[in-house]
Image (cartoon, grey):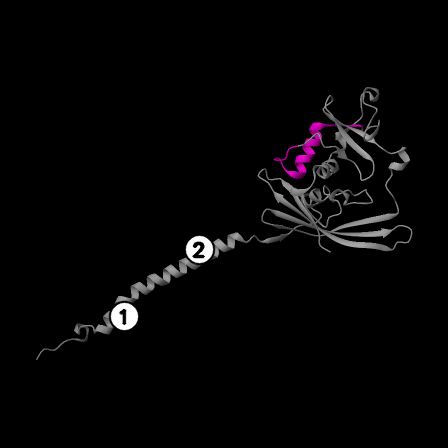
Amino acid sequence: MIIMKFDDIPATNNEKGKKSLFIPILIVVIIIVAILIVYSIVNGSGKSKVIELDTNSRLVQSLYTGVHDFKSTSPYWMYDGENTSSIANMTESNKMVLAYLNLKASDFLASNNCQLLPQENYYGKLVCNDKTVIMREDVERSYKEVFGNNVILNTAVNMKVNPEHEVYVYNSELDSYILYSSAEDDDTQDFSKAFKYNYNIYKAEQEGNVIRVYEELTVERVSTGAVENQSKYLYTFALEEDNMYSYTSIEKIA
């Protein structure tokens, strides 16, 4: 009689089958886990986190102050009254308004001799003061600061100062823009004081390479203090290759 120890008993077919299946199943599980990890990484990288920005920060304020005319009784006149305006589809004339609004105080110059300049043209009479001349290179700098380095300034397009009568006309001999006005006298150049415009940035946020600035505008009648209108606007800016933000759109959202 042959006596066999328990460990010497041959494995049954079921036990062999279980062992043979273990490794393939383990490999499949590892592959599935790897696929899930890669999928989550890819999809996670495609969704940028929305970060709330300080509305009083220099970044937000510098972008915001360049997008409309705070002085005018029609602060959004350069957008032709549209509720939504993509800057890519904006007319050159209206783009030049934004270029004007972003000029520095030092960009405005007095003429060395107003008598040597054309005294009148289609746009009105020459305005001779400390803001008569703006050099083309300064206008071009401001234009690119708003719309990015890839844009090209068209000097054939004049630069409107307000929705009424003042305009800068390019003078090729001086390579500068010269101020003309169709107003009858200087007193008519003041903006209307009938309404008070209260602007407020109530939210600013960054998502990836995009910054969104949310503005609330309240219009009050000065004589009564009554609120005539309330509206909200969304401004969008996109980061360019030079790490500077360019203006992309405005939208009335309420």
User: In front here: 208 or 161?
Assistant: 161
The quarter holding residue 176 reads top right
Q: Is residue 94 above or below residue 155?
A: below
| Residue at (51, 55) in percent of width and height | 44
- Report the residue at 71% width, 31% height from top: 139
Residue 125, given in percent of the width and then of the height, sits at 85, 28
Q: Secondary structure at mark 1?
A: helix
Quarter of the picture holding the N terminus: bottom left
- Residue that appears at 50% across and 55% down: 43
Type of the residue with mark 1: Lys
Furthest-front residue in view? 122
Q: Residue 55 location, x and y as percent?
A: 70, 49
Spatial CA distance of label 1 from label 2 is: 30 Å
Give residue 38's mark: 2
| Residue 32 within the segment the image draws in magenta | no
Local crowd size for mark 2, using a 10 Å CA cut-off: few (<14), some (14–19), many (≥20): few
Give the residue number, with chain letter if any, for mark 1. 18
Q: Residue at x 87, y 55 (%)?
A: 226
Asked if residue 244 lies left or right of residue 229, the reply is left
| Magenta residue check for 135 | yes
Residue 35 in the image: state x and y as whole percent: 41, 58
Q: Which is nearer the eye, 95 or 32?
A: 95
Q: Magenta part of the protein: which range?
A: 132-152
